[in-house]
Image: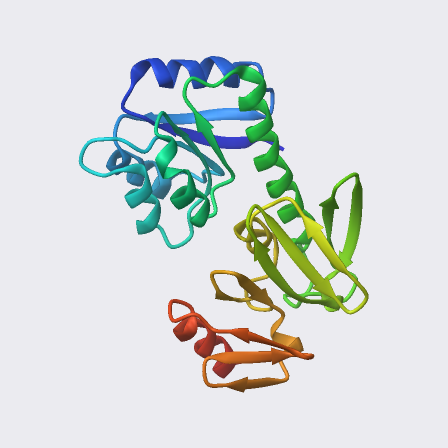
Amino acid sequence: MKIRSIIIDDEPLAQRVIEKYAQDIPFLEIAGKCNQAVEAIEILHQKQIDLLFLDINMPKLSGIDFLKTMKHPPLVIITTAYAEFALEGYELDVVDYLMKPFAFDRFVKAVHKAQDILSSKLTTEEQPGTSDHIQEEQFIFVKSEKKTFKVNLNDLMYVEALGDYVKIYTHERMIVSYQSLKNVETILPPNRFPRVHKSYVISLSKVELIEGNQVRIGEKFIPIGSNYKMEFEKLVRSA
């Protein structure tokens, strides 16, 4: 699987470092370079991009503000010299946060995180000619410490963010996995598994009750965030 990426950074040296590192990763393709975030908009409209290497401190529009403008952004690896933006970056569900200057091994680790997410996403996609509906046998693989669990989508109840980790609840178990909630959201069918809060993705079929700004799944009451309420209500009406 080839990962198509673009570099968004106003420092030519930083662009060259990423390009040089990318040359030694066979599955990583640099499809474009931008000196400003606004320049990336046209590329994103013209090409299918899987991954952004995004600087923060840039003229006209910062990397963080640019990321906030996108409703469905590609995966993002932040590359910056400013550690104080790390928390805000992770709140926006970036794959990783690389502090300049970063070594090649650290770069490879970040890219492999993106590769794992994209590979998991492909696992859940239907093959050509199959039904539009998600079949019962569909599943995802979830890494937890040194184990990899197969999670059937019909068994998944909800996913809860826990710092740099997520807690994945099924009928049988709870799995703690080192990844962001955004990563999990990316690999799940959105019509079946909507995000209802900055800390929760739920299975729509497991919702037993909607009351005010919360839903009940089993014995768990899960809040509906104001930023997600409208989309969730639309999904419920169309179900």
Quadrant of the drawing holding the N terminus: top right
In the displayed structure image, the side of residue 229 where residue 142 appears, left or right: right
Q: In the picture, residue 35 is in which quadrant?
A: top left
Q: Where is residue 33 in the image (x, y as percent from the top left)?
A: 35, 25
Residue nearest the observer in this picture, 172 or 7: 172
* Residue displayed at 34% across by 36% down: 43
Residue nearest the observer in this picture, 183 or 71: 183
* Residue displayed at 36% across by 40% down: 44
* Residue displayed at 54% across by 85% down: 210
How does the figure colour the protein chain or chains? rainbow
Q: Where is residue 14 in the image (x, y as percent from the top left)?
A: 36, 18
* Residue displayed at 60% across by 20% down: 26
Residue nearest the observer in this picture, 97 or 205: 97
Q: In the picture, residue 24 is in which quadrant?
A: top right
Numbered circles on residues, count? 0
Quadrant of the drawing holding the C terminus: bottom right
Residue nearest the observer in this picture, 112 or 25: 112
Q: Where is residue 99 in the image (x, y as percent from the top left)?
A: 43, 25
